[in-house]
Image (cartoon, rainbow, N blue to C red):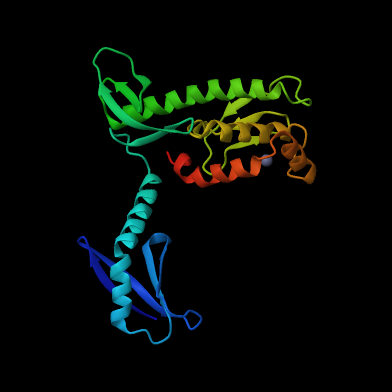
Amino acid sequence: MTGSTITYGGERISFSVVENPKISGKVRIHVYPYGSVKVETPLNTPGEEIFAAMRKRVRWVSKQLQLQREGRLHALPREYRSGETHFYLGRRYVLKALQQDACPSAVKLKGGQLQVTTKNNTVGEIKKTLTRWYRLRADDYFKKRLREISANLGWVDSPPGLKLRVMRTQWGSCSPAGLICINPRLIRAPRDCIDYVLLHELCHLRQHNHSKRFYNLLDKNLPNWRHVKSRLDGMAELLLVE
Ligand SMILES: [Zn+2]
């Protein structure tokens, strides 16, 4: 395996070259996660042919690398500054930090903006105000949906108790005593994903494990839950970050 670099729009793109006896004719270009670029060639492909192929696709390669960088940037810890992206019920909002002397801190959704008004407009104040708002919205929304979903489930007599708990890798849990814990950060997810997590925990009220019977129950009440779960899994990194 050898390697080389090519320049595009002021960006130096490194790539490795691998000969593959199984391919014939065309050079293949792959962009892998974390910015690695690999060029697969038939045996004995001349260097200038490899460069010509890279030059032809370099715009596309550069775009892939840019998209990857942006995707990773979204999962970085938030800075709580104007212009940053925040999520609520699956929608993307742009944070707008506003300063006002006399009023108590407030959060308002307006158009595509998440407006956070604080007295001193410091990062600490904005973060605290926003976290508290998310928690209140989560408590309210999850309780409402637990009531509504429970009403259709034969094994739930009355909606179970709800506790909010920040977890780093989990959306929810259900205690043997029947108390449901939900991660307040789930309020950032789309509504169908929230419903799936709530239903999952409600099924645990009947089946306290992940047995076949548990999944049968889930299948019966939400036939497409696997699809919804995989969507939520795909967003998890983005939604769980503080
Ligand atoms: Zn479970």
| Residue nearest the observer in this picture, 148 or 207 | 148
Residue plotted at (72% across, 23% down): 152
| Quadrant of image for the N terminus | bottom left
- How far across and down, in percent of the image, does residue 28 sit? 41, 72
Q: Residue furthest top?
A: 102
27 over 86 or under it: above or below: below
Q: Residue furthest bottom?
A: 44
Residue plotted at (74% across, 42% down): 215
Q: Quadrant of ligand 1?
A: top right
| Residue nearest the observer in this picture, 227 or 144 | 227
| Residue nearest the observer in this picture, 181 or 86 | 86
172 over 74 or under it: above or below: above
| 215 sits left or right of 38 in the view | right
Residue plotted at (33% across, 28% down): 126
- How far across and down, in percent of the image, does residue 129 sit? 37, 24
Task: Report which quarter residue 16 is drawn in.
Answer: bottom left
- How far across and down, in percent of the image, does residue 92 sit? 40, 34
| 80 sits left or right of 211 in the view | left
Task: Report which quarter residue 50 is drawn in.
Answer: bottom left
Q: Residue furthest left?
A: 10
Residue plotted at (49% across, 43% down): 235
- How far across and down, in percent of the image, does residue 9 sit? 21, 60
Q: Residue furthest front?
A: 25
| 58 sits left or right of 10 in the view | right
